[in-house]
Amino acid sequence: MRQLLARSSSHRFLALLMTTLLTAPLAQAQTPATPLEDNQRITEGYIAIAYELGAVLDPTLTPGGSSAVRPNWFTFAPHASRTGGEGMLAAAIAKRIIAAARLRPSLSVTQALQRAGLGVELRVSPEQLGLELVLQGLSPDAAASLGSLITSMNGAALLDVRTLTATALRLAALYWSAPGFWPLDKAESVVRTLERTLHEGNLAIFDDIGGSGRLYLDWRRTAGAVTPERVLAEFTLVDAVPSQAAQAYAYALAHAYDTPRPYLFEQVFPGIHYKSLLVAAFALYEKARVAPTPTERDALVAMGNNYIAWREQHDMAQPVFSPASPRPDEVSRVELLRLLTPLLRTEFGTVVWNYADFAYSQPDRDGNPLTSPPTEYNWAVFMDRWTGILYAFDQAYLQPRGLWVMPGPIVDPTALAATP
């Protein structure tokens, strides 16, 4: 009885936390949150959902604990959100460099990075890239600001001189194409584009999938004895079609053990509204909860994860990364993401995923030894992003407990060290 009360108390606490995170007070609504403030709220929101839904699959899981059960999509989400926040912080550092340069230009890339507070360890990769940009005609401050965008990324990828050269050339070309006449205005346009892209993607995914996860857990708490069949028949989301959700659920049961695991859902479900996949995923999690073996449980969880990730990337992220109508004060988001793709990195707790590792594991696309494989991919292209994410899932499934080392608040490492 004491354990039941404790678990009920934990669920009430998580529900209260999510209500607080998702419902901003009126006073706060009048003052828009910064991208980093939104990111922190979103990351914490995902963590709360991850633990509550994780306890559905593993009743022994408690907030702050870990589980050896295959992680659900929401266990990955806080780490991905945190990575986006680190990119937003890098953009904030770049804007700091630009603001300082408007008052007093720097004499070198190193000086510009030092003035922003980047210590030796943090500025190695930004300085390396910044110096390459100076060779492409950029001013030291413009080069330093753009170089600082990779502060939290996989700088080791630049050890391949082919990647370094391609990244510098692409970034310089993007800079020269940027709106504005003055060097700092052009640099600021690039920085603005990255910050907006990360922020808008963060918000879009959380509002859709985070909101759906919260609705599901709220429904589940009052539904009584939950079965997959009840989820499909009774749980609803706006735009989801019950017959489509049931079709996706049946397909997952029939193909959960396929190799490779099904992932080309445009071909499998032509004409489906992909929000139906979210309902099917929650039903699969419920089926996994009562699976007779860990192997069956893990296969069903993985299918549910793929369904949610498809909705996330195909419907919510893609329009942000490749907008139909680019903004006049931005550079191309597609080209910006292309040049950053080789440097992408996410720490899923103790499991580190680098896009470069994925690219090097694939057949060489162009067969040209003068180009590095990571530079042949583009995060803005759906299939390049989608297959890289599936690769990350498979890596993380080998170390399920590692994902439960949840990210803490983002701390600006330059805040105290910055000088005017």
Image: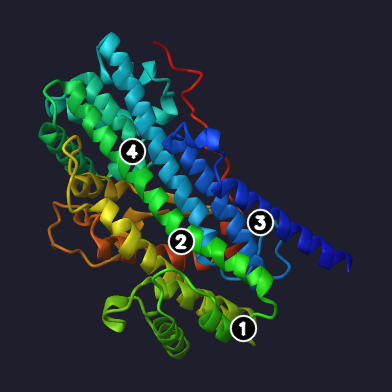
Q: Is residue 401 above or below residue 295?
A: above
| Residue 227's disc number | 1
Amino acid bearing label 2: Ile
Q: Residue at x 26, y 65 (%)?
A: 383
The residue singled out by tag 3 in the image is 15
Callout 2–callout 1 Cβ contact below 8 Å: no
Q: Secondary structure at mark 2?
A: helix
Q: Few, some or many C-alpha atoms within 10 Å of disc 1 (few <14, some 14-19, many ≥20)?
A: some
The residue singled out by tag 2 in the image is 209
> Can you give x and y, in whole percent of width and height, for residue 223 in the image?
66, 75
Q: Residue at x 35, y 46 (%)?
A: 200
Q: Report which quarter residue 96 is drawn in.
A: top left
Q: Residue at x 32, y 40 (%)?
A: 196
Q: CA distance from mark 4 to mark 2?
A: 21 Å
Q: Secondary structure at mark 4?
A: helix
> Can you give x and y, in whole percent of width and height, for residue 99 in the image?
31, 18
> Can you give x and y, in whole percent of width and height, for residue 356 in the image?
32, 54
Looking at marks 4 and 1 on the same chain, the residue that comes earlier in the sequence is marked by 4
The residue singled out by tag 4 in the image is 195
> Can you give x and y, in whole percent of width and height, for residue 242 in the image?
44, 82
Observer-nearest of 105 and 232? 232
